[in-house]
Amino acid sequence: MITLESIREGAINITALEESVLFYEMLGMTFKEVAANRYALLAGTQKIDLNIVVPEIGQAEKKNADVWLLAQTPMDGIIKELKKYNVFIEKGPVERVTTSGTLYSVYVRDPDNNLIEVSTAAA
C-alpha cells in the first residue's frame, strides 16, 4: 500500500462514486461520508471533498481537477502498487524541484480522467 504524507492540493468532481473510492483507497486514502450525500477522502489530517456530478446529455467530457499527493512510500513501491492494480502511468517517474526540495513524481488518471500526481522525496 502507498503511504501518503499529505495532500498538496485538491478538489475533485466525480461521476462514479464506487470506482473513485476504490481508486483513491488504492492510493492510501480513506473514504468517509461526512454528511447526507456528502463525501470526502482523508489522508492524515487533510481532506479532499468529492462532488458527484451528473453530466448532461451531449456535454463534452472535460478534465475536472489536478491533484498532487505527497507519499512517504519510495518511488519503486509506488510504481509496484500502481502496476498491481493495473493503473497506467501516464508519465514518470520524473524529477521535480520544488520549494520543499527535490521530489520524484508519477502521473496517473483516476476513473473520471482527473490528473493525479503522486510524489515522493528524493532518496
Image: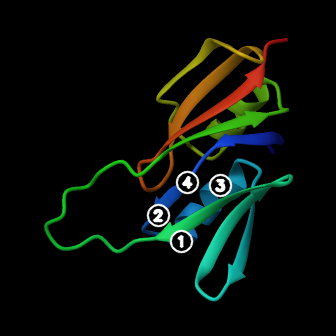
Residue 96, picture quadrant: top right
Q: What kind of residue is marked 2?
A: Ile
| Nearest the eye: 74 or 51 | 51
According to the picture, the residue beneath numbered tag 3 turns out to be 24
Q: Which residue does the numbered mark 1 point to in the structure image?
A: 17
Q: Earlier in the sequence, mark 3 or mark 2?
A: 2
Q: Nearer the viewer, residue 73 or 41?
A: 41
Front: mark 3 or 2: 2
Kind of residue sitting beneath label 4: Ala
* Image quadrant in which you'd find residue 55: bottom left
> Given the image, on which type of amino acid does mark 3 rest?
Tyr
**Discs 1, 2 touching: Cβ within 8 Å:** yes
Q: Nearer the viewer, residue 2 or 9?
A: 9
Cα distance between the residues tagged 1 and 4: 15 Å
Cα separation, mark 3 vs mark 2, equals: 12 Å
Whichever of labels 3 and 1 marks the residue nearer the N terminus, that label is 1
Q: Secondary structure at mark 4?
A: loop
Residue 14 image label: 2
Residue 59: x and y in percent read 18, 64
- Identify which residue is drawn at 68% across, 84% down: 35
Instruction: Kindly report the distance in space between the C-alpha atoms of the residues bearing marks 3 and 1.
Output: 11 Å
Label drawn at residue 11: 4
Tell me residue 12's x, y (percent).
52, 56
Callout 3 touching callout 4 (CB < 8 Å):
no
